[in-house]
Image: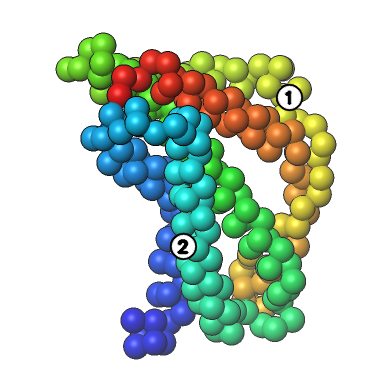
Amino acid sequence: MSLKYDEPLVMFVPSLIVTCLHDFYMLMFMALSLQTEAKRLHLWLHTPQPAFRLVGAKLVIAFGSMLISLFVSALFTYIALLAVKERYFHAKMWNHALFIEKGALVVLSIMLLSIHIAILGLLYWVIYRICKQMIPKMAWLAVTLAYFLIGWLFLSFMQTDVYEWLTEWGKIAVPGAVFKYDAAEGWIMIEKMEMMPIGVIVFYGMMDVLIFCASVWLIDRKVEV
């Protein structure tokens, strides 16, 4: 369609959307894998491997699969944006190095967020399996309540000074780009340095490790196979 109508945005917009949707790639991969596994959890009794390795292997496979898919999607987005640049930007108004740096940061953010969402999904799957044993007919309701309760507690925690102290440290400058439309020049790219705290990455990384360990422990101790 992009070639037919000679409009690069027709290719760029869907490619960008698909790239951003990779935030949920690992979550969907893990959900489908765990749902299949739920039908044969009894086989886990006959393997010497602990739940840590079994679930960890699924995460690694999901991550590797996401990298391949994300690379292809990001490549299409990059090719489409080059066509957009030729159509809507003057050469002197385009900073290619800045675009590459910003794009790399966006891809890295998508990867980290995808891991975080997948691990949270693992936690809620474990909660569901436990509730299904205790209250089979109300398991989904219990998980929904747990989701809102945990979300409310974490949002309340985010408003405290402790959260700010844990996350707002180690700020570093990272390249950013702002796109503006000028009546004389058309679309232009403006460099804008942004501050990113390392503490946020460390905090959520440690939280993901703790959630993963807690989930695996619950599978070993509380989830009947």
**Of helix, strand and loop, which one carries label 1?**
helix
Q: Distance of mark 2 from mark 1, alpha carbons?
A: 33 Å
Q: Quadrant of the N terminus?
A: bottom left
Mark 2–mark 1 contact, CB under 8 Å? no
Answer left or right for 162 relative to 219.
right
Query: Which residue: 63% across, 62% down?
Result: 103
- Report whether residue 18 is seen: yes
Residue 198 lies in quadrant = top right
Helix, strand or loop for disc 2:
helix
91 on left or right of 50: right
Q: Residue furthest left?
A: 137
Which residue is nearer to you in this view: 89 or 27? 27
Task: Looking at the picture, tell me which residue is in the foreground, 107 or 221.
Answer: 221
Q: Residues within 10 Å of mark 1 (few under 14, many from 20)?
A: few
Q: Badge 2 is on which residue?
A: 69
Q: Position of residue 151 (x, y in %)?
A: 47, 22
Q: Nearer the viewer, residue 138 or 88?
A: 138
Identify the mark nearer the N-term, 2 or 1.
Answer: 2
Instruction: Establish if 202 lies above or below 2.
Output: above
Locate residue 145, reporting x and y percent.
Answer: 34, 17
Direction top: furthest residue: 134
Point out the frontmost of discs 2 and 1: 2
Amino acid type assigned to the residue bearing label 1 in the image: Leu
User: Is 135 rendered above or below residue 77?
Assistant: above
- Residue identified by numbered label 1: 166
Which residue is drawn at the image coordinates 35% and 20% (left, top)? 223
Neighbours of disc 2 within 10 Å: few (<14), some (14-19), many (20+): some
Residue 213 got which mark? none
Residue 173 drawn at (x, y percent): 81, 49
Tell me the residue at 81%/40% (across/down): 171
Left/right of residue 165 with respect to residue 203 in the rendered view: right
Looking at the picture, which amino acid does disc 2 mark? Ser
